[in-house]
Structure formats: structure tokens, C-alpha cells
Image: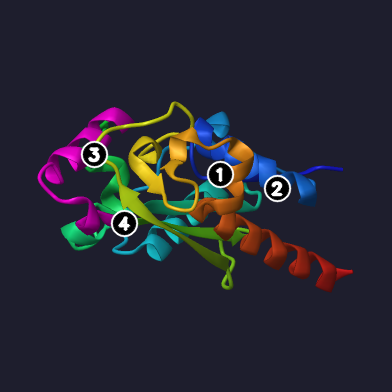
């Protein structure tokens, strides 16, 4: 029997990536939009704080276990920006294309060797709204910022994130390879392992 969890996101790309990895656990994530859950206010000052805020918010509304992630891209030249503000870098309600373009503009005259960056992801699993011991997992993916978008896969900043090991952008990778390498894939595999251990302890 497949167990249901609510994903504190309505992002279809994120949902697809997460469900591909959760399938091994016989867990299916359903987007909070399916339950008409409004977005939580991301008032935290770190990826961890925002992920917990979003997971508690979703669990409070839906009354089933919740998974949330907070992720973003950190650019060294910009002292870690956009960081936790990655999804709204160009303003509230900004599109992926607008956020991506703002980052390219900020780095317009920056040489390649100074364009180091990384994707960060913190993922949280709560058994219920009041869970005092959330499972927390983190993944980091190192790379560089390209000077122009490449590729059509993925979402967010994928088209301008150069993956040094594969000499292409994240948006040029297949979903299978991206899930093996990515910050979200790393965090989710760690989370899945911890959830499996938690389930085994109950047996």
C-alpha cells in the first residue's frame, strides 16, 4: 500500500523529482495545492528554518505527514546571494526566467573563474504538525554560473548552472543523472534512508 505525504510545494518539477526517489519507499507525495493549502510565509533566515515552517504549515492543514524543502543557489561573488531568496530574487511572483536573468545581469562582467556557485537543499519530514523531532537532510551541488542559458530540462536556475563533472548545464542532463547528482537528490536520499530507519524501528 502506498502511503501519502503532503509536499509543501506546488512546483511540478520539484514534485516529479521527489516522487521518482520516494517510489522505492512506497510513499507518494501530493502537492499541497491539491488540498487548497495556502503558501506558508517564509519568514526564516535559513534554509532549515523555512523548510520546517513550510512542513508544519502543510501538516497543520492536511493532517498527514509532510515533506518540505527549501533550496536555492549561492553565488560566491555575490556573497551567497540569492540564497534563501532564490525563488523571489527578481521580486515576489517573479518567474524562473526573470530570476535567472537578474542573476545573469548581476554577473555580466564577472570572469569565469569568479563565477563559482552551488545549489543548496534542506529537506524536512514531519510525522505530524507537532512533531518535535523532524528529520532534516541537506544536499550541496557545486558548480559555476554560465554566461547564457543552455538546455531545456529542469527548472529554476538549471539552464545557467554548469555541472563541471559533465561539462554541461543542469538543464542538459537527463532526469536520471540529475537526480543522482543534484542537491535535492542528495538530500532526498538521505531523508529516505532516515524515514526507512524510523519505519523499521516501529516493526
Q: How is the image coloured?
A: rainbow
Number of residues whose C-alpha sits closer than 10 Å to that of mark 3, classed few (under 14), some (14–19) or many (20 or more): some
Give the quarter of the figure containing the C terminus: bottom right
Between marks 4 and 3, how big is the CA–CA gap? 13 Å
**Helix, strand or loop for disc 2:** helix
Image: magenta residue range: 95-116
Q: Label for residue 117?
A: 4
Q: Mark 4 or mark 2, which is nearer the start of the sequence?
A: 2
Number of residues whose C-alpha sits closer than 10 Å to that of mark 1, classed few (under 14), some (14–19) or many (20 or more): some
Residue beneath the point at 71% across and 64% down: 193
Reply yes or no: does residue 114 show up in magenta: yes
Q: Label for residue 178?
A: 1
**Helix, strand or loop for disc 4:** strand
Residue beneath the point at 17% across and 57% down: 78
Q: Which residue is mark 2?
A: 22
Tell me if 190 is positioned left or right of 46 in this view.
right
User: Is residue 183 shown to the viewer in this render?
Assistant: yes
Secondary structure that dominates the magenta span: helix
Amino acid at each position: 500500500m502506498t502511503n501519502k505525504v503532503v509536499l509543501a510545494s506546488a512546483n511540478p518539477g520539484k514534485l516529479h523529482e521527489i516522487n521518482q526517489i520516494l517510489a522505492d519507499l512506497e510513499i507518494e507525495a501530493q502537492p499541497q495545492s491539491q488540498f487548497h493549502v495556502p503558501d506558508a510565509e517564509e519568514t526564516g533566515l535559513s534554509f532549515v528554518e523555512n523548510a520546517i515552517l513550510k512542513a508544519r504549515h502543510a501538516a497543520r492543514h492536511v493532517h498527514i505527514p509532510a515533506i518540505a524543502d527549501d533550496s536555492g543557489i549561492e553565488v560566491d561573488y555575490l556573497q551567497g546571494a540569492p540564497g534563501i531568496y532564490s525563488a523571489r530574487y527578481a521580486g515576489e511572483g517573479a518567474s524562473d526566467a526573470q530570476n535567472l536573468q537578474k542573476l545573469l545581469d548581476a554577473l555580466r562582467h564577472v570572469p569565469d573563474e569568479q563565477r563559482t556557485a552551488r545549489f543548496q537543499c534542506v529537506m524536512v519530514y514531519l510525522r505530524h504538525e507537532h512533531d518535535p523531532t523532524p528529520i532534516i537532510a541537506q544536499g550541496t551541488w557545486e558548480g559555476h554560473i554560465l554566461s547564457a542559458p543552455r538546455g531545456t530540462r529542469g527548472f529554476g536556475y538549471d539552464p545557467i548552472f554548469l555541472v563541471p563533472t559533465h561539462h554541461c548545464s543542469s538543464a542538459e542532463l537527463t532526469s536520471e543523472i540529475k537526480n543522482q547528482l543534484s542537491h535535492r537528490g542528495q538530500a532526498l536520499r538521505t531523508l529516505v534512508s532516515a524515514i526507512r530507519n524510523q519505519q523499521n524501528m516501529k516493526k
